[in-house]
Image (cartoon, coloured by chain):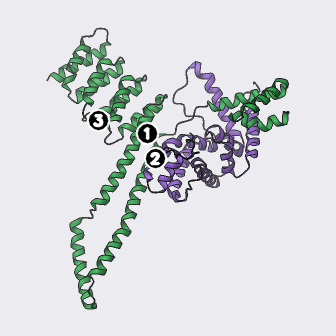
Amino acid sequence: MTEPDKSGSNVDPTSDNTIMEQVRDGQVAKLAILFERHHVMLYNFFLRLTGRRGPGEDLVQEVFVRILKYRATYRSESKFTVWMYQIARNAHADYLRKQKPEVPLGEQFEEPAGAEPPPADRMDAEIDAALLRRALDRLPLRKREILLLSRYENMKYKDIAELLGCSIETIKTSVHRAIRELRKIYLELQGGVS
Amino acid sequence: MNCDKIREDFADFLAGDLDEGMLREVRAHLAGCPACRTEIETLSALWTKLGVLPPEQPGPALREKFYGTLEAYLAGMEGEREKPGLGRSLSRLAARLMPRRPAYQAALALALLAVGLGGGFWLGGQRPSVKNEILALRQEVGDMRQTAALSLLRQPSSSDRLMGVNWAENVRQPGRPTVDALVRTLNEDPSVNVRLAAADALYLFAGQPGVKESLVKSLARQRSPLVQVALIDLLVSVREKRALEALKILAADEKLEPGVRQKAESGVKELSL
Protein backbone atom coordinates (compact mmCIF):
# COMPACT_ATOMS: atom_id res chain seq x y z
CA MET A 1 0.00 0.00 0.00
CA THR A 2 1.33 3.39 -0.81
CA GLU A 3 0.98 6.59 1.08
CA PRO A 4 -0.51 9.72 -0.40
CA ASP A 5 1.93 12.11 -1.99
CA LYS A 6 3.26 14.59 0.48
CA SER A 7 4.71 16.98 -2.04
CA GLY A 8 3.39 20.53 -2.02
CA SER A 9 2.60 22.82 0.86
CA ASN A 10 -0.51 21.08 2.16
CA VAL A 11 0.23 18.20 4.50
CA ASP A 12 -2.21 15.34 4.11
CA PRO A 13 -3.48 14.51 7.62
CA THR A 14 -4.12 10.92 6.60
CA SER A 15 -0.69 10.26 5.10
CA ASP A 16 1.56 7.63 6.65
CA ASN A 17 4.17 10.27 7.41
CA THR A 18 1.75 12.54 9.30
CA ILE A 19 0.37 9.63 11.31
CA MET A 20 3.87 8.40 12.17
CA GLU A 21 4.77 11.93 13.31
CA GLN A 22 1.76 11.82 15.63
CA VAL A 23 2.81 8.41 16.93
CA ARG A 24 6.31 9.78 17.53
CA ASP A 25 4.88 12.78 19.38
CA GLY A 26 2.81 10.72 21.79
CA GLN A 27 -0.39 9.67 20.02
CA VAL A 28 0.81 6.11 20.13
CA ALA A 29 -2.60 4.48 19.63
CA LYS A 30 -2.54 5.80 16.04
CA LEU A 31 0.04 3.16 15.24
CA ALA A 32 -3.00 0.91 14.79
CA ILE A 33 -3.82 2.83 11.58
CA LEU A 34 -0.36 2.13 10.16
CA PHE A 35 -0.62 -1.50 11.24
CA GLU A 36 -3.93 -1.89 9.43
CA ARG A 37 -2.50 -0.25 6.29
CA HIS A 38 0.72 -2.18 6.07
CA HIS A 39 0.70 -5.44 7.98
CA VAL A 40 -0.62 -7.63 5.14
CA MET A 41 2.00 -6.45 2.64
CA LEU A 42 4.68 -6.63 5.28
CA TYR A 43 3.60 -10.18 6.10
CA ASN A 44 3.77 -11.15 2.42
CA PHE A 45 7.19 -9.52 2.17
CA PHE A 46 8.47 -11.65 5.05
CA LEU A 47 6.62 -14.71 3.82
CA ARG A 48 8.46 -14.50 0.51
CA LEU A 49 11.77 -13.82 2.25
CA THR A 50 11.54 -16.56 4.88
CA GLY A 51 9.20 -18.98 3.15
CA ARG A 52 7.39 -19.61 6.43
CA ARG A 53 4.19 -18.28 7.90
CA GLY A 54 5.12 -18.50 11.57
CA PRO A 55 8.33 -16.46 11.29
CA GLY A 56 6.56 -14.21 8.79
CA GLU A 57 3.98 -13.25 11.41
CA ASP A 58 6.58 -12.99 14.18
CA LEU A 59 8.65 -10.63 12.05
CA VAL A 60 5.67 -8.36 11.35
CA GLN A 61 5.05 -8.19 15.10
CA GLU A 62 8.75 -7.50 15.65
CA VAL A 63 8.68 -4.60 13.16
CA PHE A 64 5.81 -2.91 14.98
CA VAL A 65 7.45 -3.49 18.36
CA ARG A 66 10.60 -1.83 17.00
CA ILE A 67 8.57 1.04 15.59
CA LEU A 68 7.19 1.61 19.09
CA LYS A 69 10.63 1.32 20.61
CA TYR A 70 12.34 3.65 18.16
CA ARG A 71 9.42 5.97 17.40
CA ALA A 72 11.34 8.96 18.77
CA THR A 73 13.97 8.49 16.04
CA TYR A 74 11.52 8.90 13.15
CA ARG A 75 12.39 11.93 11.02
CA SER A 76 9.59 13.69 9.16
CA GLU A 77 11.65 14.16 6.03
CA SER A 78 12.03 10.44 5.48
CA LYS A 79 9.18 8.52 3.92
CA PHE A 80 7.43 6.24 6.42
CA THR A 81 7.50 3.15 4.19
CA VAL A 82 11.23 3.53 3.59
CA TRP A 83 11.83 3.84 7.33
CA MET A 84 9.53 0.89 8.08
CA TYR A 85 11.25 -1.33 5.52
CA GLN A 86 14.63 -0.37 6.94
CA ILE A 87 13.38 -1.73 10.26
CA ALA A 88 11.91 -4.76 8.46
CA ARG A 89 15.22 -5.56 6.73
CA ASN A 90 17.10 -5.27 10.02
CA ALA A 91 14.58 -7.57 11.73
CA HIS A 92 14.97 -10.05 8.87
CA ALA A 93 18.77 -9.88 9.06
CA ASP A 94 18.58 -10.64 12.80
CA TYR A 95 16.23 -13.53 12.05
CA LEU A 96 18.67 -14.94 9.46
CA ARG A 97 21.56 -14.74 11.92
CA LYS A 98 19.63 -16.96 14.31
CA GLN A 99 18.83 -19.55 11.62
CA LYS A 100 20.91 -22.61 10.82
CA PRO A 101 21.50 -22.72 7.07
CA GLU A 102 20.73 -26.42 6.84
CA VAL A 103 17.75 -26.46 4.47
CA PRO A 104 18.19 -24.90 1.02
CA LEU A 105 15.85 -21.90 0.83
CA GLY A 106 13.97 -23.15 -2.22
CA GLU A 107 13.01 -26.36 -0.43
CA GLN A 108 11.73 -24.93 2.80
CA PHE A 109 8.92 -22.80 1.39
CA GLU A 110 5.47 -23.65 2.56
CA GLU A 111 2.68 -23.80 0.03
CA PRO A 112 0.05 -21.05 0.34
CA ALA A 113 -2.64 -21.74 2.94
CA GLY A 114 -5.54 -23.06 0.91
CA ALA A 115 -8.32 -24.32 3.15
CA GLU A 116 -10.17 -26.21 0.42
CA PRO A 117 -9.16 -27.55 -2.97
CA PRO A 118 -10.02 -24.98 -5.65
CA PRO A 119 -12.81 -25.64 -8.17
CA ALA A 120 -11.66 -27.14 -11.47
CA ASP A 121 -11.96 -23.91 -13.46
CA ARG A 122 -9.68 -22.12 -11.02
CA MET A 123 -7.15 -24.94 -10.90
CA ASP A 124 -4.95 -23.71 -13.78
CA ALA A 125 -4.71 -20.20 -12.39
CA GLU A 126 -3.88 -21.52 -8.93
CA ILE A 127 -1.18 -23.83 -10.27
CA ASP A 128 0.27 -20.98 -12.27
CA ALA A 129 0.27 -18.70 -9.21
CA ALA A 130 1.92 -21.43 -7.12
CA LEU A 131 4.63 -21.86 -9.80
CA LEU A 132 5.24 -18.14 -9.87
CA ARG A 133 5.52 -18.02 -6.08
CA ARG A 134 8.02 -20.88 -6.13
CA ALA A 135 10.01 -19.16 -8.86
CA LEU A 136 10.04 -15.97 -6.80
CA ASP A 137 11.17 -17.93 -3.75
CA ARG A 138 14.16 -19.26 -5.69
CA LEU A 139 15.44 -15.86 -6.72
CA PRO A 140 18.54 -14.68 -4.85
CA LEU A 141 17.58 -12.68 -1.76
CA ARG A 142 18.61 -9.24 -3.02
CA LYS A 143 16.77 -9.57 -6.33
CA ARG A 144 13.73 -10.98 -4.56
CA GLU A 145 13.69 -8.04 -2.18
CA ILE A 146 13.88 -5.52 -5.00
CA LEU A 147 11.07 -7.17 -6.94
CA LEU A 148 8.85 -7.43 -3.85
CA LEU A 149 9.38 -3.80 -2.94
CA SER A 150 8.85 -2.45 -6.43
CA ARG A 151 5.98 -4.70 -7.42
CA TYR A 152 4.01 -5.12 -4.19
CA GLU A 153 4.80 -2.08 -2.11
CA ASN A 154 4.73 0.08 -5.25
CA MET A 155 7.88 1.72 -4.01
CA LYS A 156 9.56 4.15 -6.38
CA TYR A 157 13.04 3.15 -7.51
CA LYS A 158 14.50 6.18 -5.75
CA ASP A 159 12.96 5.02 -2.44
CA ILE A 160 14.32 1.50 -2.93
CA ALA A 161 17.72 3.01 -3.74
CA GLU A 162 17.57 5.01 -0.50
CA LEU A 163 16.51 1.94 1.44
CA LEU A 164 19.24 -0.31 0.05
CA GLY A 165 21.87 2.42 -0.02
CA CYS A 166 22.70 2.37 -3.74
CA SER A 167 22.02 4.38 -6.88
CA ILE A 168 18.73 4.46 -8.79
CA GLU A 169 20.57 3.10 -11.86
CA THR A 170 21.70 0.06 -9.87
CA ILE A 171 18.12 -0.59 -8.79
CA LYS A 172 16.80 -0.27 -12.35
CA THR A 173 19.42 -2.68 -13.66
CA SER A 174 18.63 -5.07 -10.80
CA VAL A 175 14.90 -4.98 -11.59
CA HIS A 176 15.62 -5.87 -15.20
CA ARG A 177 17.97 -8.69 -14.21
CA ALA A 178 15.66 -9.96 -11.50
CA ILE A 179 12.65 -10.23 -13.79
CA ARG A 180 14.74 -11.99 -16.45
CA GLU A 181 16.04 -14.46 -13.92
CA LEU A 182 12.56 -14.96 -12.55
CA ARG A 183 11.30 -15.82 -16.00
CA LYS A 184 14.12 -18.33 -16.47
CA ILE A 185 13.28 -20.09 -13.18
CA TYR A 186 9.56 -19.93 -13.92
CA LEU A 187 10.08 -21.62 -17.29
CA GLU A 188 12.28 -24.28 -15.69
CA LEU A 189 9.56 -25.02 -13.15
CA GLN A 190 7.02 -25.28 -15.94
CA GLY A 191 9.22 -27.92 -17.52
CA GLY A 192 10.41 -25.63 -20.28
CA VAL A 193 6.92 -24.87 -21.56
CA SER A 194 6.44 -21.14 -22.12
CA MET B 1 17.31 4.66 -29.53
CA ASN B 2 19.33 1.44 -29.56
CA CYS B 3 19.01 -1.94 -27.78
CA ASP B 4 21.28 -0.89 -24.86
CA LYS B 5 19.20 2.19 -24.18
CA ILE B 6 16.03 0.09 -24.24
CA ARG B 7 17.52 -2.16 -21.55
CA GLU B 8 18.41 0.87 -19.45
CA ASP B 9 14.84 2.12 -19.63
CA PHE B 10 13.25 -1.27 -19.16
CA ALA B 11 12.59 -0.87 -15.41
CA ASP B 12 10.95 2.53 -15.99
CA PHE B 13 8.88 1.00 -18.78
CA LEU B 14 7.59 -1.71 -16.41
CA ALA B 15 6.80 0.79 -13.67
CA GLY B 16 5.01 3.06 -16.15
CA ASP B 17 7.46 5.87 -15.40
CA LEU B 18 8.39 6.75 -19.01
CA ASP B 19 7.05 10.04 -20.33
CA GLU B 20 5.17 10.24 -23.64
CA GLY B 21 8.26 11.20 -25.66
CA MET B 22 10.35 8.32 -24.32
CA LEU B 23 7.48 5.91 -24.81
CA ARG B 24 7.21 6.91 -28.46
CA GLU B 25 10.93 6.31 -28.93
CA VAL B 26 10.71 2.89 -27.27
CA ARG B 27 7.76 1.92 -29.46
CA ALA B 28 9.58 3.06 -32.59
CA HIS B 29 12.59 0.92 -31.67
CA LEU B 30 10.46 -2.12 -30.85
CA ALA B 31 8.71 -1.88 -34.20
CA GLY B 32 12.02 -2.53 -35.93
CA CYS B 33 13.74 -4.84 -33.39
CA PRO B 34 12.14 -8.28 -32.94
CA ALA B 35 14.64 -9.31 -30.21
CA CYS B 36 13.82 -6.35 -27.95
CA ARG B 37 10.13 -6.70 -28.75
CA THR B 38 10.09 -10.35 -27.66
CA GLU B 39 11.99 -9.58 -24.48
CA ILE B 40 9.80 -6.66 -23.50
CA GLU B 41 6.62 -8.59 -24.25
CA THR B 42 7.56 -11.69 -22.29
CA LEU B 43 8.97 -9.84 -19.31
CA SER B 44 6.05 -7.41 -19.19
CA ALA B 45 3.66 -10.35 -19.16
CA LEU B 46 5.50 -11.82 -16.18
CA TRP B 47 5.53 -8.44 -14.43
CA THR B 48 1.75 -8.26 -14.87
CA LYS B 49 1.35 -11.80 -13.54
CA LEU B 50 3.39 -10.88 -10.49
CA GLY B 51 1.13 -7.91 -9.88
CA VAL B 52 -2.02 -10.02 -9.77
CA LEU B 53 -0.59 -12.68 -7.49
CA PRO B 54 -3.04 -12.53 -4.58
CA PRO B 55 -1.46 -11.63 -1.23
CA GLU B 56 -1.79 -14.20 1.54
CA GLN B 57 -3.59 -13.21 4.71
CA PRO B 58 -1.83 -13.65 8.04
CA GLY B 59 -3.66 -15.51 10.81
CA PRO B 60 -5.91 -13.60 13.24
CA ALA B 61 -3.36 -14.12 16.05
CA LEU B 62 -1.10 -11.48 14.49
CA ARG B 63 -3.70 -8.75 15.00
CA GLU B 64 -4.46 -9.91 18.52
CA LYS B 65 -0.76 -9.87 19.37
CA PHE B 66 -0.25 -6.41 17.90
CA TYR B 67 -3.19 -4.85 19.74
CA GLY B 68 -2.16 -6.63 22.95
CA THR B 69 1.32 -5.13 22.64
CA LEU B 70 -0.06 -1.70 21.83
CA GLU B 71 -2.41 -1.71 24.81
CA ALA B 72 0.38 -2.88 27.13
CA TYR B 73 2.65 -0.15 25.76
CA LEU B 74 -0.02 2.51 26.29
CA ALA B 75 -0.63 1.34 29.84
CA GLY B 76 3.13 1.33 30.51
CA MET B 77 3.45 4.82 29.06
CA GLU B 78 0.76 6.12 31.37
CA GLY B 79 2.44 4.52 34.37
CA GLU B 80 5.76 6.13 33.46
CA ARG B 81 4.12 9.51 32.92
CA GLU B 82 2.61 9.43 36.41
CA LYS B 83 5.83 8.58 38.31
CA PRO B 84 7.88 11.78 37.90
CA GLY B 85 4.78 13.95 38.36
CA LEU B 86 3.97 12.35 41.66
CA GLY B 87 7.59 12.53 42.79
CA ARG B 88 7.82 16.22 41.95
CA SER B 89 4.60 17.07 43.82
CA LEU B 90 5.68 15.14 46.89
CA SER B 91 9.10 16.72 47.07
CA ARG B 92 7.58 20.21 46.66
CA LEU B 93 5.10 19.45 49.43
CA ALA B 94 7.82 18.00 51.67
CA ALA B 95 10.01 21.07 51.17
CA ARG B 96 7.17 23.36 52.23
CA LEU B 97 6.07 21.38 55.27
CA MET B 98 9.41 20.14 56.63
CA PRO B 99 10.30 21.73 60.04
CA ARG B 100 13.75 23.21 60.39
CA ARG B 101 14.82 21.37 63.59
CA PRO B 102 16.08 17.78 63.06
CA ALA B 103 14.21 16.39 66.08
CA TYR B 104 10.90 17.66 64.72
CA GLN B 105 11.88 16.34 61.28
CA ALA B 106 12.30 12.80 62.72
CA ALA B 107 8.98 13.01 64.56
CA LEU B 108 7.25 14.20 61.45
CA ALA B 109 8.83 11.37 59.44
CA LEU B 110 7.46 8.78 61.90
CA ALA B 111 4.05 10.38 61.87
CA LEU B 112 4.04 10.44 58.05
CA LEU B 113 5.06 6.79 57.96
CA ALA B 114 2.06 5.88 60.12
CA VAL B 115 -0.27 7.99 58.02
CA GLY B 116 1.22 6.49 54.89
CA LEU B 117 0.67 2.91 56.04
CA GLY B 118 -2.90 3.59 57.13
CA GLY B 119 -3.68 5.60 54.01
CA GLY B 120 -2.18 2.91 51.82
CA PHE B 121 -4.62 0.34 53.17
CA TRP B 122 -7.49 2.81 52.90
CA LEU B 123 -6.86 3.82 49.32
CA GLY B 124 -6.10 0.31 48.14
CA GLY B 125 -3.84 1.59 45.41
CA GLN B 126 -6.62 3.35 43.51
CA ARG B 127 -5.56 6.24 41.26
CA PRO B 128 -8.71 7.19 39.40
CA SER B 129 -7.16 9.76 37.09
CA VAL B 130 -4.59 7.25 35.76
CA LYS B 131 -7.26 4.60 35.42
CA ASN B 132 -9.48 7.01 33.52
CA GLU B 133 -6.67 7.90 31.17
CA ILE B 134 -5.92 4.24 30.46
CA LEU B 135 -9.62 3.65 29.91
CA ALA B 136 -9.67 6.53 27.43
CA LEU B 137 -6.67 5.11 25.57
CA ARG B 138 -8.25 1.66 25.52
CA GLN B 139 -11.35 3.27 24.09
CA GLU B 140 -9.15 4.82 21.39
CA VAL B 141 -7.70 1.43 20.51
CA GLY B 142 -11.24 0.01 20.56
CA ASP B 143 -12.31 2.69 18.08
CA MET B 144 -9.47 1.66 15.82
CA ARG B 145 -10.57 -1.96 16.02
CA GLN B 146 -13.97 -0.81 14.85
CA THR B 147 -12.39 1.14 11.99
CA ALA B 148 -10.50 -1.99 11.01
CA ALA B 149 -13.68 -4.07 11.23
CA LEU B 150 -15.61 -1.62 9.05
CA SER B 151 -12.83 -1.59 6.50
CA LEU B 152 -12.67 -5.42 6.41
CA LEU B 153 -16.45 -5.70 6.02
CA ARG B 154 -16.16 -3.73 2.77
CA GLN B 155 -13.54 -6.03 1.24
CA PRO B 156 -14.36 -8.15 -1.81
CA SER B 157 -12.93 -11.35 -0.30
CA SER B 158 -15.35 -13.28 1.93
CA SER B 159 -12.52 -14.37 4.25
CA ASP B 160 -11.70 -10.69 4.86
CA ARG B 161 -15.34 -9.94 5.59
CA LEU B 162 -15.49 -12.90 7.97
CA MET B 163 -12.48 -11.46 9.74
CA GLY B 164 -14.27 -8.10 9.85
CA VAL B 165 -17.26 -9.71 11.58
CA ASN B 166 -14.87 -11.38 14.00
CA TRP B 167 -13.26 -8.04 14.74
CA ALA B 168 -16.58 -6.33 15.21
CA GLU B 169 -17.77 -8.92 17.70
CA ASN B 170 -14.62 -8.46 19.75
CA VAL B 171 -15.38 -4.79 20.31
CA ARG B 172 -16.78 -4.41 23.80
CA GLN B 173 -19.23 -1.66 23.07
CA PRO B 174 -19.58 -1.15 19.33
CA GLY B 175 -20.84 2.16 18.00
CA ARG B 176 -23.82 2.60 15.74
CA PRO B 177 -21.80 2.42 12.47
CA THR B 178 -20.37 -0.98 13.46
CA VAL B 179 -23.78 -2.37 14.43
CA ASP B 180 -25.31 -0.98 11.22
CA ALA B 181 -22.51 -2.53 9.16
CA LEU B 182 -23.19 -5.90 10.80
CA VAL B 183 -26.92 -5.60 10.05
CA ARG B 184 -26.12 -4.68 6.44
CA THR B 185 -23.79 -7.67 6.22
CA LEU B 186 -26.50 -9.94 7.64
CA ASN B 187 -28.99 -8.69 5.07
CA GLU B 188 -26.88 -8.23 1.97
CA ASP B 189 -23.66 -10.24 2.07
CA PRO B 190 -23.52 -12.75 -0.79
CA SER B 191 -21.79 -15.37 1.38
CA VAL B 192 -23.94 -17.51 3.69
CA ASN B 193 -20.99 -18.04 6.05
CA VAL B 194 -20.46 -14.30 6.45
CA ARG B 195 -24.19 -13.74 7.03
CA LEU B 196 -24.21 -16.50 9.67
CA ALA B 197 -21.21 -14.95 11.41
CA ALA B 198 -22.91 -11.54 11.34
CA ALA B 199 -26.02 -13.05 12.95
CA ASP B 200 -23.86 -14.53 15.74
CA ALA B 201 -22.11 -11.21 16.26
CA LEU B 202 -25.42 -9.34 16.47
CA TYR B 203 -26.63 -11.82 19.06
CA LEU B 204 -23.86 -10.51 21.33
CA PHE B 205 -25.17 -6.98 20.88
CA ALA B 206 -28.86 -7.86 21.14
CA GLY B 207 -29.15 -5.55 24.15
CA GLN B 208 -28.34 -2.49 22.07
CA PRO B 209 -31.22 -0.36 20.81
CA GLY B 210 -32.64 -1.43 17.49
CA VAL B 211 -30.64 -4.67 17.15
CA LYS B 212 -33.49 -7.08 17.96
CA GLU B 213 -35.78 -5.17 15.62
CA SER B 214 -33.21 -5.44 12.82
CA LEU B 215 -32.94 -9.17 13.42
CA VAL B 216 -36.73 -9.57 13.15
CA LYS B 217 -36.79 -7.59 9.88
CA SER B 218 -33.86 -9.61 8.55
CA LEU B 219 -35.66 -12.89 9.18
CA ALA B 220 -38.32 -11.93 6.63
CA ARG B 221 -35.77 -11.21 3.90
CA GLN B 222 -33.40 -14.16 4.32
CA ARG B 223 -33.56 -16.87 1.66
CA SER B 224 -30.91 -19.28 2.93
CA PRO B 225 -32.36 -22.01 5.19
CA LEU B 226 -29.17 -21.99 7.27
CA VAL B 227 -29.47 -18.28 8.04
CA GLN B 228 -33.20 -18.56 8.61
CA VAL B 229 -32.72 -21.32 11.18
CA ALA B 230 -29.89 -19.42 12.89
CA LEU B 231 -32.04 -16.28 13.15
CA ILE B 232 -35.03 -18.21 14.50
CA ASP B 233 -32.82 -19.80 17.20
CA LEU B 234 -31.39 -16.43 18.05
CA LEU B 235 -34.70 -14.58 18.29
CA VAL B 236 -36.22 -17.34 20.39
CA SER B 237 -33.23 -17.39 22.75
CA VAL B 238 -33.53 -13.62 23.38
CA ARG B 239 -37.34 -14.09 23.72
CA GLU B 240 -38.15 -11.47 21.12
CA LYS B 241 -41.95 -11.44 20.95
CA ARG B 242 -41.97 -9.09 17.97
CA ALA B 243 -40.66 -12.03 15.93
CA LEU B 244 -43.93 -13.91 16.35
CA GLU B 245 -45.55 -12.48 13.22
CA ALA B 246 -42.54 -13.24 11.01
CA LEU B 247 -42.30 -16.74 12.47
CA LYS B 248 -45.99 -17.43 11.79
CA ILE B 249 -45.53 -16.35 8.15
CA LEU B 250 -42.54 -18.68 7.78
CA ALA B 251 -44.36 -21.57 9.44
CA ALA B 252 -47.22 -21.19 6.96
CA ASP B 253 -45.04 -20.83 3.86
CA GLU B 254 -45.24 -24.13 2.00
CA LYS B 255 -42.45 -23.22 -0.38
CA LEU B 256 -39.94 -23.20 2.47
CA GLU B 257 -37.80 -26.17 3.42
CA PRO B 258 -39.61 -28.41 5.93
CA GLY B 259 -36.78 -27.99 8.46
CA VAL B 260 -37.18 -24.22 8.47
CA ARG B 261 -40.97 -24.41 8.77
CA GLN B 262 -40.64 -26.85 11.64
CA LYS B 263 -38.18 -24.56 13.38
CA ALA B 264 -40.50 -21.58 12.87
CA GLU B 265 -43.45 -23.54 14.29
CA SER B 266 -41.56 -24.53 17.42
CA GLY B 267 -40.36 -20.91 17.70
CA VAL B 268 -43.97 -19.69 17.63
CA LYS B 269 -44.84 -22.16 20.39
CA GLU B 270 -41.91 -21.14 22.59
CA LEU B 271 -42.51 -17.43 22.21
CA SER B 272 -46.24 -17.82 22.86
CA LEU B 273 -45.64 -19.41 26.26
| Residue B170 drawn above or below residue A95 | above
Residue A131 appears anywhere in the view = no
The N terminus of chain A lies in which quarter of the figure? top right
* Location of mark 2 (residue): A32
| Residue A186 drawn above or below residue B130 | above
| Residue B200 drawn above or below residue B71 | above
Residue A185 is left or right of residue B145, and the answer is: right
Residue B9 appears anywhere in the view = yes
> Which chain's colour is purple?
A
Q: Nearer the viewer, mark 1 or mark 3?
A: 1
> Which chain's colour is green?
B
Residue density around tag 2, few if under 14, some if 14–19, many if 20 or more, within 10 Å: many
* Location of mark 1 (residue): B148
The subunit carrying tag 1 is B
Q: On the same chain: label 1 and label 3? A: yes
Q: Nearer the viewer, residue A33 or B197?
A: A33
Residue type at mark 3: give it.
Phe
